Image (spheres, rainbow, N blue to C red):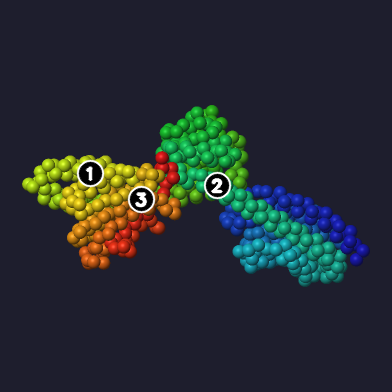
Amino acid sequence: MSSIHPLLIDLAERTATLIVLAFFLSRFRFFRRVLRRTDGPRDKIITTIICTLIGIYGTYAAIPIEGALANSRVIGPVMAGLLGGPIVGTAAGFLAGLHRYFLGGFTDLACAVSTTVEGALAGLVYMRYHHRSIHWKMAWVVGFIAEGIQMLLILGIARPFADALHLVEIIALPMMLVNASGIALFVMIVQTAKAEEEKIGSMQAQRALQIADITLPILRQGLNETSAEKTARVIYNMTEAAAVAITDREKILAHIGAGDKHHQRGTPLQTEATLKAIHTQQLLWAKSKTEIGCSSIDCPLHSAIIVPLRKKDTVVGTLKLYFKKQHEVSVVDWELARGLAQLFSTQLEIADLEKQAALLADAEIRALHAQINPHFLFNALNTISSFIRTKPETARRLIVNLAEFFRRNLHQGDRIITVEEEIKHVEAYLEIEKARFGDKLQIVTEIQPEAWKQRIPGLILQPIVENAVKHGLLPKKAGGTILIRIGKENNALVIQVIDDGVGFAASTESRPFSGIGLQNVRGRLKSLYGNPYDLTIEANPGGGTVCTITIPWKERNVS
């Protein structure tokens, strides 16, 4: 037992070298892909090779003991199994064990078999913890058990048995303790690297969201030269890229930064890497000037990340981050570009949906508007026709008013106009209706001064006033009064038309929203503003009806 303590120290010193190597491995991208459990065949092969080399190094760094070797070979195969699974662990164990077998010695076969078994055992643990992290304590237990199995295999295979037993008595405890601790430290380094990876991902996600927040209103215009230039400048100012470019499938839409003298807006695509990214629909990392394939030999850009921009399943362009040095692209840049491309692709799809929704709403508004104008024209012409023989001068004046109304309507009926302009529409209509009603129709207006310049949909008020005249005052023999009240309430523009007529309960024909005009007004409000903005109709406590329109209040429109 006196020899165990020095052996423990010597093994710990050699294992420390492997731990340092593990730290350097954790800096490489392939290692981080392995940590994310998204590694493909290529990364598994690399993991197998590196862990095999670690195992071989552990053999060469061994301490000769009684014709055998006290070593840290187990660390390589066990880490291969914990990182890559049973196949990787078994392969690394077999290769490292095969190397040990060819070195000879009375434990050569036992060590070859045990190394393979240890890698396979670690792979089985990987299967158990495939979707979650392996804690360093579990790794220590795996390493301790694996080395214990190796000691049993030495006793079972190596001959003479007396020599094998004597060897195990010397090396068992030091190797089980040191190698288990080495594996635990290796896993701790892995967990640290994974935490750093998650932190990088979080930081890049935050930066990508910041950029997306700024560019969202820009990309709502769609992908064009103006939106691309503004977006590229935002990314250029918020990243360390030497240049940022955005293209469609055929030409450069924007290029900000180094190389802008030949990567000019509007010119055809100049780099083979961009064409390849569009064709393959895959994120591309060009590590050198040759891989970028720029047509200009003086181009200062030597590496790049090129990310396709998609609308659904179709590539509509690319986002490119350029750098001035070869291999300058880091994991940070890679994750940022990937995140931005996903966000931008989503924004472009949303922009298309918003454009389609706007076109649909515009078509709906025009259809509803077309129904309103003939309805008013029919009533107006009926009124005028009644004066043509008896009061031709009045008829002429009313025709002038009607012409003025439709002149305004042609220019402003399908637009957003001011309250002042809408009131002029209503006055033109009321001039015609007053000719019919005479003194039976009285109009009162109460409009707050700051409300005159508020903007509202054209012809939104006239159908309400028409409804009050036709269904409220016309059935009432004595006529009545219409009050038009417009002002600000609870950060909304509130328009009220209040009459003291018969009320909507007096006739089945005048129930709320039974007429085309009111239905269309409500439809237009819903199309333009949505909830909670609406048209409501209520009974007036003093008799008659109260129609209320609510529209968003815009402070910037007040002058």
Q: Earlier in the sequence, mark 1 or mark 3?
A: 1
Q: Nearer the viewer, residue 231 or 280?
A: 231
Residue 528 percent across, percent down from the top left: 35, 52
User: Which secondary structure, mark 3?
Assistant: strand
Residue corresponding to mark 1: 405
Q: Do residues under tags 2 and 1 come within 8 Å of each other at their CB atoms?
A: no
Q: Nearer the viewer, residue 510 or 127?
A: 510
Left or right, residue 463 beside residue 115: left
**Residue at the limit of the structure toward the right, as seen here:** 2
Alpha carbon separation for disc pair 1 and 3 = 21 Å
Location of residue 549 (image quadrant): bottom left
Residue 408 seen = yes
For the point 75% across and 54% down, which residue is it?
19
User: Which secondary structure, mark 1?
Assistant: helix
For the point 50% across and 39% down, which residue is it?
232
Q: Which mark is residue 17?
A: none
Q: Amino acid at mark 3?
A: Ile
Relative height, residue 228 to residue 110 (above, below): above
Q: Amino acid at mark 1?
A: Phe
User: Which secondary structure, mark 2?
Assistant: helix
How crowded pointer 2 is (Cα within 10 Å; few <14, some 14-19, many 20+) is rated as some
Numbered disc total: 3
